[in-house]
Amino acid sequence: MPPPRKALIDGVFYFWGKCATHVDICTNIQETSRILKEDVTHVDIYINSPHPMGEGARSAGERTKRNQIIHSKKTKAAFTLAEVLITLGIIGVVAALTLPNLIANYQKKQAVTQLKATYSVLAQAFERAKVDYGDMETWGLDSIYGQTSGESNLYTNFVETYFIPYVKPIKNYKITSLKTIGYKNIYKLDGTPDNSLLDTPRYYVILPNGTITGFSLDGHCDASHEDSDGNTVCDSQWYYTDLYIVTDINGKKAPNTLGKDIFVMSTMDNQFGFYRYKGLESDREWLLKACSKGSKENRHCGRLIQYDGWEIKDDYPW
C-alpha cells in the first residue's frame, strides 16, 4: 500500500491516500512536522474510510473528514510594550548621563590633534627658515627693538620673508582682522568676548590644513611686576621684540574660544613656541591658574597642554 501523499498549503498539512489507521496518519504528520521543523496545530486529514460491505463495495470518492489537533506548537517569548518602554527609558537615562562626557572627550582629543599638527607646521617652517637665514637673532629682530610705530610694515616684511615661502598658505589675507575675515566673536574661557583678538589687525593666512593663523609684533617691558590676579604689569616702556602668533585650529567654526580652538604662540628669545612671559618661569600650577575661566591670561593654555604631554587633563577648564 503506497504511503499517503502530503502537502503544506497555507500553513495546513493535507494528507490523502490509503492508510490503515488514523494513528498511522497522525504519526506521519508528526514525523513530517519534525523533519520540516514546522509548527503544526491544525491538520485536515482526508482518508478513504472502509465501507461496511467491504473494500469493493466502497463507492469511489466517498471520504470522511476529521479534524485533528496536534499539540506541538512551540511557545515563543516576546517583550510586552511596558517592558520595551521601560528599557528604552533606562537607555535614555544612561545616554543622558554619559553622552556629554563622551562628546567632551572627543572634542578634547580632536583639539589636541589639530593643535599639535599646527604647532608642528609652524615650528618646521621656522626651522627651515633658520637653515636658509641662520638663527632668528640674525633675522632683523634687533632693528625692531624699541620701535613702537609702523609695526604693520615691519611684521609684513618679516612674515613674507621668513614664513610664507615655507608653508605655502592656500589663502593670504595679508593685514586684516578676524572681524573683517568674518568672525562675529572671539571668547575667553569664561564666555566673555575678547575684542582685542577680534579687532586687532594682523597678517592672516590660511594654512593647508585649514588653520587660520595671524602674525603681529609682540614685545616686553624692561621692568615689570605681577599683580594680585597674576597679570603682568609694565613698569617701563613697551618694546616690540618678537612675533605674536594667533592660530585658530579649526578655522571659523565654533567655539572660537581661547584655550579650546584658538591658541597663541610666539618667537620670544628667537625661539618658536607657545606664548610665555619673558624671564618668567612658570610651573604647572601657574599655567593652570593662567588658563582658568577667571583669568585674563587664557593665551597661556597652549603651554599647559604641551606641559601635560600634549593632553587635556581632567582639571583643564574645558
Image (cartoon, rainbow, N blue to C red):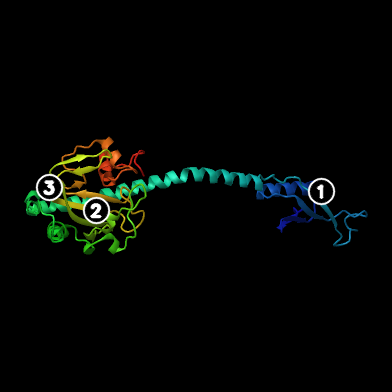
Residue farthest right in this picture: 53
Q: Earlier in the sequence, mark 2 or mark 1?
A: 1
Q: How many marks?
A: 3
In the rendered image, residue 176, in percent from the top left (x then y), is placed at 23, 63
Can the viewer see residue 45 in this picture?
Answer: yes
Residue farthest front in this picture: 235
Please report the residue visible at 32 percent of the width from the left and 59 percent of the height from the top: 252
Amino acid type of the residue that numbered disc 1 sits on in the rendered structure: His
Which label number is shown at residue 246?
Answer: 2
Q: Earlier in the sequence, mark 3 or mark 2?
A: 2
In the rendered image, residue 238, in percent from the top left (x then y), is placed at 15, 49
Q: Is residue 192 left or right of residue 13?
A: left
Pointer 3 residue: 270
In the rendered image, residue 50, in percent from the top left (x then y), is placed at 87, 53
Q: Earlier in the sequence, mark 1 or mark 3?
A: 1
Q: Is residue 85 left or right of residue 290?
A: right
Please report the residue visible at 37 percent of the width from the left and 48 percent of the height from the top: 107
Camera-side residue of 110 and 27: 110
Q: Callout 3 environment at 10 Å: few (<14), some (14 to 19), or many (20+)?
A: some
Q: CA distance from mark 2 to mark 1?
A: 93 Å
Q: CA distance from mark 3 to mark 2?
A: 17 Å
In the rendered image, residue 71, in percent from the top left (x then y), is placed at 76, 45
Camera-side residue of 74 and 211: 211
Pointer 1 residue: 22
Amino acid type of the residue that numbered disc 3 sits on in the rendered structure: Asn
Amino acid type of the residue that numbered disc 2 sits on in the rendered structure: Val
